Amino acid sequence: MTQLLAIAIGGALGALCRHGVALALVGTRFAYATLLVNVAGCFVLGALVHNGLAGDGRLKMLAHPAVTVGYLGALTTFSTFSFQTIVFLEERAWLLAAINVAANLVLGLLATVAGMALSRALAAPAV
C-alpha cells in the first residue's frame, strides 16, 4: 500500500509539472511542450535509473517506482506525441510531422545517453 501511495504522489507531481509546461508553451504551433517533457523524462530516467536510485532498502523500494512509474510516467507522454503527429499529418503539415517524430526520437535518445553519462561521471571515483 505504501508503494502505491508513493507512485500516486509521484504521478501527481509529474502531471502537475507536465501541465505547467503545457501552460507555459500554450499557443505555439509546434508541439514544444510534449517534446520538452519527453526529452526531460528521458534524461532523468537515464540519470537516475541507470545506476539505480540512491539509497538502499525501503527508501529505494519506494523511490524507484515513485520516480519511474509515478513521476516520469505522468510527466512524459507517448500518446500525446502520437496524436500531435497524426494531427500534423491530417493538416498536411508534413515537415512539422517529420520534425516532431525525429526530434522526439533523436533528442530522447540523446537525453537518455546524456543522463546515463552524467550518472556514470557522478558515480566515478574521484582522481
Image (cartoon, helix red, strand yellow):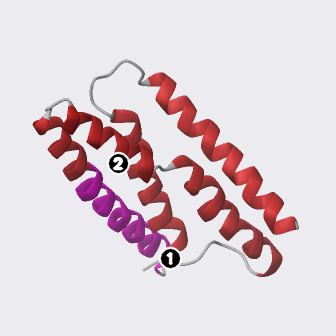
Specify the quadrant of the image occupied by residue 84.
top left
Residue 34 in percent (x, y) is at: 40, 40
Question: Which image quarter is the N terminus in?
Answer: bottom right
Specify the quadrant of the image occupied by residue 58.
bottom right
Residue 2 in percent (x, y) is at: 87, 66
Is 1 on the left or on the right of 39, as rendered?
right
Q: Residues within 10 Å of mark 1 (few under 14, many from 20)?
A: few
Residue range of the region highlighted in magenta in the rendering: 104-124
Residue at image mark 1: 123
Q: Earlier in the sequence, mark 2 or mark 1?
A: 2
| Mark 2–mark 1 distance (CA, rounded to whole Å) | 36 Å
| Residue 31 to residue 123: above or below | above
**Element type at mark 2:** helix
**Element type at mark 1:** helix
Specify the quadrant of the image occupied by residue 26.
top left
Is 69 on the left or on the right of 9, as rendered?
left
Q: Mark 2 or 1, which is nearer the eye?
A: 2
Residue at image mark 2: 82
Q: Is residue 80 magenta?
A: no
Residue 97 in percent (x, y) is at: 19, 41
- Residue at image position (41%, 70%) is 116
